[in-house]
Image (tube, rainbow, N blue to C red):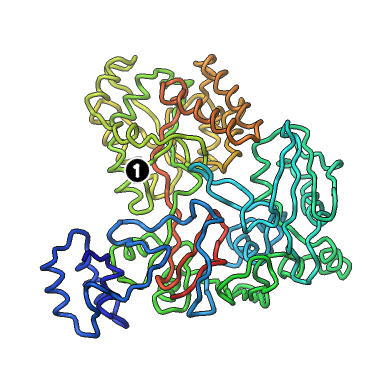
Amino acid sequence: MKMNRREFLKAAGITGLSAATLATLCACGAKGTSASTTAATDAQITGPAAAPTDPPVTAHPDDWDFMAEGCFRPSYPANVDEIPTGFTTSKDELIIRMAQDEGSMDPLSGGLYITPSCIFNLCGTSMLAAGYVDGGIDMQINKYSACDSMTWDDDHMGVTFHIREGAHFHNGDPVTSADLAFSVRRFSSNARFSYINFENITCVDDDTLYIPMTRQDGNFLFIMGIFVHIFSEKVYNEYVEKGKEADFFYCSEGTCGMYEITEWVSGDHVTLKADHTHYLVPTIETVTVRFIADNTVAMMELETGGIDLLYGPSTPDIQNVLAGQYGDAISGVENAGDVMTLLGMNIAGKFSDLNLRYAVTHAVDWKTVIKAAWGVMGSEPTTILASTLYGLENISDWWQSMYDVEKAKECLANSAYADGVKLSLIIGNGSNVVAASEMLKNYLNKVGIDLDIQTYDAATQSDIIGKNDGWDLWIRDFGGYGMTWGSNFIEGGTYHKICHFDVTEPDNAKELFDLGIQLSSTLDHDTFATVAKKIQDGYLEGKFFYIFPITQAKIVTLGTAELHNWFRTKDNLYIADSYFE
């Protein structure tokens, strides 16, 4: 019978062993282990081993042999509403490590930082919640959202939200459409909400809110799910009248999540208890968020049981877990982030020559660059931009076949720079990018391209590449989130400002700008995906080949292997159905 490492250790009845001992034993359960090797190893183990044909293994919905797979399991579910339910837990407190207390949950004042966002998503909710959509992430109606339906007008110039039955604040008051309207109107002076017709937002009835728009904008779903935290208008006004407005955003009296805050000790911890009257009652009774700045201390706490989830682990700690140093005790989740590390080209200068663009990208062994510069935190791109831009098709084969030295030499020979060329690369001072840039220099030198690497702080780098002369290449992270991507492609958008393709390719630029307008002005999912594919097709054909995807860095969260059925999508922790074995 073939068993993964987790099953092997459980079947052998191994408990309480050191990390080093477990790591050694884990090597016995590698994929492809022969029956004779397994039998010999079993014979050396003392303890109440179960019959090899019937090991006492509990089936968990998220079992994943990360040491055999070489990576952690995906951090977000394919469908939030299909997360398995009905489990019991052996432990009633979940302890989460955050690096620092970043302050209030007010989204107008720092509440969108990772720590307050995570805390809010435990004790509160929004009209929409993060979910997985066609390879990307966007905001949606799912079982965590305060609303159970979202209905668009035929022209997508207005949307009606309906509050789900049983939604209430922690003071007992029901969530009403007036509270939703209040929460949206808090952003009436925010430029990102400029297309919302605030004056005509209508409470149709207590459970139904209508939001009209002056134009369609792809940012709408994002801002409704990320920015607009639902707060009780009544409780907020009570705090304001007492002169304690700031305190309101450190408590959960006016929020409507599955947990409520019972204690917030600044800089030390936040404790939350389950609200058993909420429409989504969690299995685990208590959640404690501990603030631990030092990664070494945090990892020791995870190893010894002082915490159960570790946000922001160090790369060496991630490598050690994947290598089996902690055996069966620590696992994790991972997913590509919402940005891609890109190589960008100045199309207004030397890179107006398409052959030169391909000469550079064919000359580099990108797989080796990722492995050396990013290690386990890097991933080979599967899309031309960050995968959060849904509607893109998998381009793994195209990307993996890019490295071809002979083709690079051929492209350079066919360019205006057949005798060689000197290029400048503008980068920031991040260690990953610095290491990758040195490797690029070596690869390009082999085909006759001399690369001058210039390192600047982020602000200076932005200033330099914002001009259309004086530089040739840049490396930096760019991304987006769901339908917010559209604004990157319009005239004056991100890629126009940093690649300057309109100077030498006005026809291609106009086509891309038109597609960008279509992408940023639709809220129809199918239309968005269709336009995104047109941009991708144009890119692969060479019309929009202004950037090259280097790597989509991973976001990893480590956790005790005893915790199951937990997910992290963006800053949302989906733990209503989580449990300890």
Q: Is residue 176 above or below residue 150?
A: below
- Numbered disc 1: secondary structure: helix
Q: Is residue 174 left or right of residue 446?
A: right
Given residues 94 and 470, the one toward you in this image is: 94
- Quadrant assignment, res 376: bottom left
Q: Is residue 214 above or below residue 159?
A: above
Given residues 453 and 540, the one toward you in this image is: 540
Residue shown at the point (74%, 36%) measured from the top left: 153
Residue 373: image location, x then y, percent: 33, 48
Residue 393: image location, x then y, percent: 44, 34
The quadrant in which the N terminus is found is: bottom left
Residue shown at the point (41%, 21%) measured from the top left: 541
Residue shown at the point (49%, 51%) measured from the top left: 78
- Quadrant assignment, res 176: bottom right
The quadrant in which the C terminus is found is: bottom left
Residue 308: image location, x then y, percent: 47, 73
Residue shown at the point (59%, 70%) measured from the top left: 282
Residue named by callout 1: 436
Label 1 neighbour load within 10 Å: few <14, some 14-19, many 20+: many
Q: Is residue 101 left or right of residue 11?
A: right
- Quadrant assignment, res 214: top right
Give the residue type at disc 1: Ala
Given residues 98 and 49, the one toward you in this image is: 49
Residue 495: image location, x then y, percent: 53, 30
